């Protein structure tokens, strides 16, 4: 019997708050933890591998999966569908392996409200200040001023949904925030719901107690 049932670990934050860095650290900390591979209807880009970068589906395949409850969450973005297939996630948590999701608040709510919602752990990452958030976006050197401005405009909408998450961390110190993240994951893994073997163990204890009587 599986000693522990896996978790669907959701990390969300505005761009620049440190979510990607924390996700990479979490995956390095526990190699058994896997990253959820999304499905998409867009065409593969050069070098992308089906099943590794994305699960590439046709529109018909994607819609069929949605209609058959095969997507934990999905959205239509810039003319293409994106979503999180349920099958691989169900298999992982049944085997006691956790799955990490790097998604926005809308996707997070869909997963929380899905058939696997009771096994979710949702964490929102806040920046220490808006000025620091902007500084981090600029220091990455990846985006133009126009893109940074759009990311900043979107950030407050994302931050405004912080109250719908199980835990909220202010990332003012990366090492301390990661330490808190490890503590949260470790504690939630011990949640009664995640330990299906406890029922059999308690029954065993009950039988032993009755034999003593």
Image (tube, grey):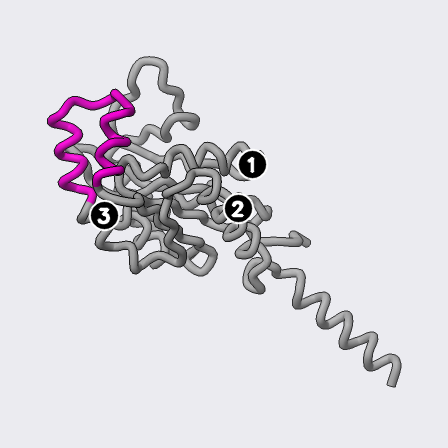
Residue at point 66% right, 68% down? Answer: 199
Q: Position of residue 25 (x, y in %)?
A: 49, 34
Task: Answer few, some or many: residues within 10 Å of disc 3's Cα (few below 14, many 20 plus, some between 14 and 19).
Answer: some
Earlier-in-chain disc, 2 versus 3: 3
Residue at point 41% right, 33% down? Answer: 21
Task: Answer few, some or many: residues within 10 Å of disc 1's Cα (few below 14, many 20 plus, some between 14 and 19).
Answer: few
Q: Which residues are magenta?
A: 131-155
Q: Is residue 142 within the magenta segment?
A: yes
Which of the labelled discs sits on residue 182, or is there none?
A: 2
The quadrant of the picture occupied by the C terminus is bottom right
Earlier-in-chain disc, 1 versus 2: 1
Q: Residue furthest top?
A: 46
Badge 3 is on which residue?
Answer: 158
Towards the viewer: 148 or 115 = 148
Q: CB under 8 Å between callouts 1 and 2?
A: yes
Does residue 75 appear to the left or right of 1 in the view shown?
Answer: left
Towards the viewer: 71 or 178 = 178
Residue at point 44% right, 47% down? Answer: 9
Badge 1 is on which residue?
Answer: 29
Q: Give me the C-alpha separation between circle 2 and circle 3.
A: 23 Å
Q: Secondary structure at mark 2?
A: helix
Q: Give me the C-alpha separation between circle 1 and circle 2.
A: 9 Å
Q: Position of residue 140 (x, y in %)?
A: 29, 24
């Amino acid at each position: 019997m599986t000693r522990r049932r896996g978790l669907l670990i959701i990390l969300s934050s505005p761009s620049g708050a440190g979510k990607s860095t924390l996700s990479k650290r979490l995956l390095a900390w526990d190699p058994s933890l896997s990253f959820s591979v999304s499905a998409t209807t867009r065409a593969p880009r050069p070098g992308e591998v089906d099943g590794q970068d994305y699960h590439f589906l046709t529109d018909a395949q994607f819609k069929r999966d949605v209609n058959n409850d095969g997507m934990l969450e999905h959205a239509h973005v810039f003319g293409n569908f994106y979503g999180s297939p349920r099958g691989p996630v169900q298999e992982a948590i049944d085997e006691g392996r956790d799955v990490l999701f790097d998604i926005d608040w809308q996707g997070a709510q869909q997963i929380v409200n899905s058939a696997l919602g009771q096994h979710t752990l949702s964490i929102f990452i806040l920046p220490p200040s808006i000025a620091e958030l902007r500084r981090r976006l600029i220091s990455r050197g990846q985006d133009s001023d126009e893109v940074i401005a759009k990311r900043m405009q979107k950030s407050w909408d994302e931050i405004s949904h912080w109250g719908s998450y199980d835990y909220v961390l202010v990332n003012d110190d990366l090492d301390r925030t990661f330490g808190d993240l490890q503590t949260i994951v470790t504690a939630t893994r011990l949640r009664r719901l995640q330990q299906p073997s406890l029922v059999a163990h308690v029954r065993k204890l009950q039988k032993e107690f009755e034999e003593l009587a």
